[in-house]
Amino acid sequence: MDELFLDAEVREEIGRGKVKDLRDKGFIPAVVYADGKDALALKLSHRQLIQLVHHHRIEGVVINLNIKDDKKHKSRPCLIKEIQYEPVHGEITHVDFNQISLTKAIKVSIPVTAKGESIGVRQEGGSLEHVLWEIEIECLPTSIPKDVEIDVTNLKLGEAVHVKDIIPPAGVKILNDPSSIVLSVSAPMKEEVPVEAVEGAEKQEPEVIKEKKEVPAEGAEEGKEGKEKK
């Protein structure tokens, strides 16, 4: 597990107007929540937090908060509970932390990555479908793996990797449904090709319904012949 550290200061600025001034000075407001304790309002360096975000995956990772003038704690191990963003420009506006114990198991989600190129893709023309991008695990904070890497080299067309196929590191328990599909190799979709007319084939003309001839009534023809004789 990578150890991440972040400096912080106790925040006296409370309220919308004061928080805006805080951001203008290069700080980001934050709050730390701990079981059975009051929430602690903090302020973080905007520059330091952005550097941490750009160089590390910080969700589901233990961050040690070094709080200035905190005589009770050398550092506070925390997990990020929520990050709030400004809707237009996407700037971080607030961070919530959950303080944790390093000796108590916790539940976190970690990413799933695929390693290699499968036989089903390379030789059989299939496509690799990444169904489950994260899995939920339970372990001590000091044992959280960076990710779960799955070797798909021998995965053939029509085959899949399920959660039950993943062998977790020692001390890590996977909480997802064992039957859930993580990765699979599926056949490529077939494109429908329009049927072209065969060269030289005659086009079928629509049937023309001809006008029905009237049949003269019985005896009408005889009357006509009698008049002509006269």
Image (cartoon, rainbow, N blue to C red):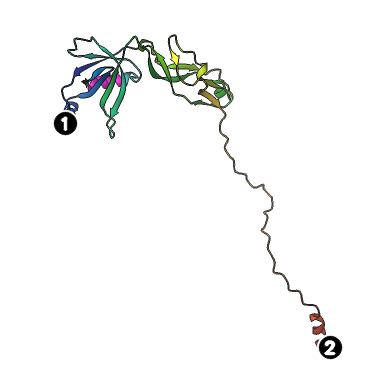
In this view, the residue farthest toward the bottom is 230
Numbered disc 2: secondary structure: helix
Name the dominant secondary structure of the magenta segment: helix
Say which of 174 and 118 sits in front: 174
Q: Is residue 117 visible?
A: no
The three-letter amino acid code for the residue at tag 2 is: Lys
Residue at screen point 60% across, 43% down: 194
Mark carried by residue 17: 1
User: Left or right of 214: which side holds 60?
Assistant: left
The x and y percentages for residue 150 are 48, 17
Whole-angstrom CA distance, mark 1 to mark 2, is 122 Å
Determine the secondary structure under disc 1.
Answer: helix
Pick the quarter of the image with the N terminus: top left
Q: Is residue 57 above or below residue 17?
A: above
- Name the residue at 25% across, 26% down: 94
State which region is magenta.
Answer: 45-53
Where's residue 104, x and y in %? 35, 11
Question: Which residue does the numbered mark 2 point to in the structure image?
Answer: 229
Choose mark 1 or mark 2, whichever is in front.
1
- In the image, what residue occupies the spot 49% across and 13% down? 167
| Location of residue 98 by image quarter | top left
Image coords of residue 163 (percent x, y): 50, 19
Q: 51 or 35: nearer the eye?
A: 35
Residue located 56% across and 17% down the image: 154
**Res 3 → quadrant:** top left
